[in-house]
Amino acid sequence: MICPHCHHDSSKVVDSRPSDEGRAIRRRRECEYCGTRFTTFERIEKSPLLVIKKNGNREEFRREKLLRGLVRAAEKRPVTMDQMNAIVDKVENELRATGENEIRSQVIGEHVMKELADVDDVTYIRFASVYREFKDMNGFMKEVQEMMGNEPEDNKKDKQTK
């Protein structure tokens, strides 16, 4: 490692510990030339995951972009940032677990909707309306009916008694 102070290229590790929930190693180093201490992080290098858009273009998967979409869909809803981050983490892990380097945007949307269905109905419908690009009320109503058909029986009974 090159010292950030004197730019000498010889340093020794003074301390190592896990960081970022075990996804990285934090190392304290000391320059053998000037004695300056500095911190470095070692992470697993992930291969890029490419998203194949509906128009056929490819772009690198960006979790920030997916999170932004969830934040917009969950606006003024009781969905926490932790829940949204957990959904993005789970979806990204599922995508990487397939072993594929290229994933269709439709597959990503389906994964997100599967997770949102258990979190908040309104957020699910908002996300679905953008993702599925409903052309008219019939498509929208069909999605709502399908969602309601997948509800646990207890929820249906609760709604019927209200």
Image (cartoon, rainbow, N blue to C red):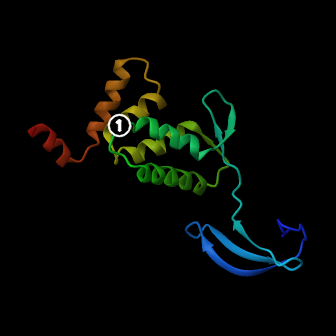
Percent x, y of residue 38: 75, 71
Q: Residues within 10 Å of mark 1 (few under 14, many from 20)?
A: few
Residue 35 placement: quadrant = bottom right
Q: Nearer the viewer, residue 138 or 77?
A: 77
Q: Does 81 sit left or right of 29 as displayed?
A: left
Residue 39 placement: quadrant = bottom right
Q: Is residue 45 above or below residue 19?
A: above
Of the residues shown, which amino acid type is indicated by label 1? Lys
Q: Does 109 sit left or right of 142 as displayed?
A: right
Total number of numbered labels? Answer: 1
Q: Residue at x 55, y 68 (%)?
A: 21
Find numbered disc 1 in the image and state the secondary structure of the residue it sits on: loop
Q: Residue at x 46, y 29 (%)?
A: 130
Q: Does 128 sit left or right of 32 as displayed?
A: left
Where's the N terminus, which quadrant?
bottom right
Q: Nearer the viewer, residue 11 or 22?
A: 11
| Mark 1, residue position | 76
Percent x, y of residue 121: 31, 39
Q: Does 47 sit left or right of 130 as displayed?
A: right
Q: Is residue 150 above or below residue 16?
A: above
Q: Nearer the viewer, residue 25 or 87?
A: 25
Where's the C terminus, which quadrant?
top left
Percent x, y of residue 43: 69, 65
Task: Tell which residue pokes out farthest to the bottom in this image.
Answer: 14
Q: Residue at x 41, y 52 (%)?
A: 83
Task: Tell which residue pokes out farthest to the left in this image.
Answer: 161
